[in-house]
Each structure stands twice: as C-alpha cells, then as structure tokens.
Amino acid sequence: MCLAALRTDNRTMTYLLPQHPFSLSAWTRATFSLVLILGLSATLITGTAQAQTGTPPPLATVASVDLDRYVGRWYEIARFPNRFQKDCSGPATADYALQANGRVQVTNRCPLADGKTDEALGEARRIGGPGSPKLEVRFAPAWLSWLPMVWGNYWVIDLDPAYTLAAVSEPTREYLWVLARQPQVDAASWDALMVRLRAQGFDLSKLQKAGGGSPP
C-alpha cells in the first residue's frame, strides 16, 4: 500500500512506526522483528527458493509515475493477506505528500477493532531517474535510515491515466495492494484490473477485500 518497508534481497514492504525504540506499539514491535529476521535470513531463503522453483519472470511496472499527480490520499481496496495488517478491522488509508527534497512523506492509517486508529509515518524515495515507478519506503525511525533492510520496494505496477486506481507490489509478488482515490471501485474498472494483474502472474485467489470479505 499501502505502503510499507521491510527489506530483504528482494525487498518487500511493511509498516513500521517511527516511535522511540523503547516505546513501540505491539504492531511496531512485531513488524520490526519481522524486518530484522527477514533481513538476516534473506540470502538463504532466496537461494533455496530459486534452487527449488527457479527465478520467476520479472515483474513489470508502469512506464512512469508523476509524483505530483500521485500524491494525496489513497484508499486501500484489497490486498494479499499479510502479518503486519492482521489487526486492521477495516480499509487502511495512505496519504502521500511531496517534500521539498523530492521525497514523499507517507502516512498510513489502519482502523482497529477497538475503535482506535494505528498510524505509521514514513518516507519514500524514488529509485531511478525522473518518472521512475519504483520507489523505496521506510517506516523505521530516521536514525535507522542508513540500514538497507529498513527500506522496502514500492513498485507501481498498474495505474490508470486519471491516477484514480493503482496496484502496488514488489519483485517477488508476495505482497499486493489495490488502491483507489475513492473507497469503492466500479465493477468494470475492477474486472479490467484483475485481467491485467492475472497476466502479470499474480494468484488472485489470495486477494482479499480490505477489512475482510470478498473483493468488489
């Protein structure tokens, strides 16, 4: 999405709240532990998987992304299940704001069953030249930003011309988010997106509506 930041050799995304390291929320502690574990074991896991199944075909991104148009609020429509959003009781939101240094401030909010909202603050940086659809996102505190493992891939793999419907993933296809400018997506747009994602090699049987239930 919603957007997220754990790093392996094939870096993936997760939430990680930038709080004081000795006063982290349960969500933050769990995801930070996951970041460290996966970061340390990535080489072994990746090598074993490739030996057993071979290298998957490269994941294609959109040709380019105009960050000036991409920033703003996005609503989570659907996602692949993931550990770090297991406590979300409804769709998350992602707010992006372009900074003077060219980076993007990221604010993810997740509603919880007790009525509270968990919030993750992070930063995204573009990888590649102007217009590149590949970004890296971190939710770790700024003082940890020198660690490669706290940065995770945020690849825009589908985006409509109006910048109202997007799909975000990472090279391994383990994570997938469908985002929209509105909380709902019309059936025709949804069906067309599913055709494109299926052609990209995603197992859409895993796709779940944000907050539970079936996708649109």
Image (cartoon, rainbow, N blue to C red):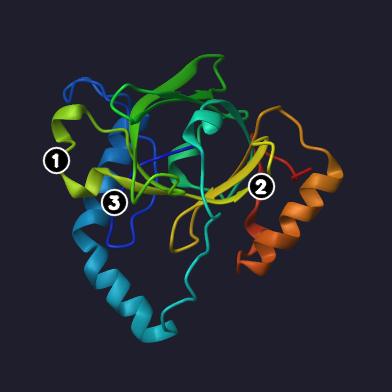
The residue positioned 27% from the left and 56% from the top of the image is 38
| Disc marking residue 7 | 3
Mark 2 vs mark 1: give the one in front: 1
Quarter-of-image position of residue 142: top left
What residue is shown with label 2? 208
Label 3 residue SS: loop
The answer to whether 115 is drawn above or below residue 29 in the figure is above
| N-term mark: 3 or 2 | 3
* Lateral position of residue 206 relative to residue 118, left or right: right
Whole-angstrom CA distance, mark 3 to mark 2, is 24 Å
Please say if 135 is above or below 56: above
Residue appearing at x 39%, y 44% in the figure: 130
**Mark toward the start of the polypeptide (2 vs 1):** 1
Of residues 71 and 22, the one drawn nearer to the viewer in this rendering: 71
Label 1 is placed on what type of residue? Trp
Element type at mark 2 = strand
- Pick the front one: 194 or 158: 158
Residue at numbered disc 1: 146
Secondary structure of residue under mark 1? loop
x and y percent of residue 113 in the render?
57, 22
Mark 3 Cα-neighbour bin, 10 Å: few <14, some 14–19, many ≥20 = many
Q: Residue furthest front?
A: 130
Question: How much space separates mark 2 and mark 1, taking CA atoms?
Answer: 34 Å
Q: Is residue 50 above or below residue 87?
A: below
Give the residue displayed 64% in from the left and 36% down from the top: 163
Residue type at the position of mark 3: Arg
**In the rendering, at what x and y percent does residue 95 appear?**
50, 24
User: Where does the image place residue 180, in percent across and percent down from the top left?
Assistant: 66, 34
Q: Which numbered mark, 3 or 2, is in the foreground of this view?
A: 3
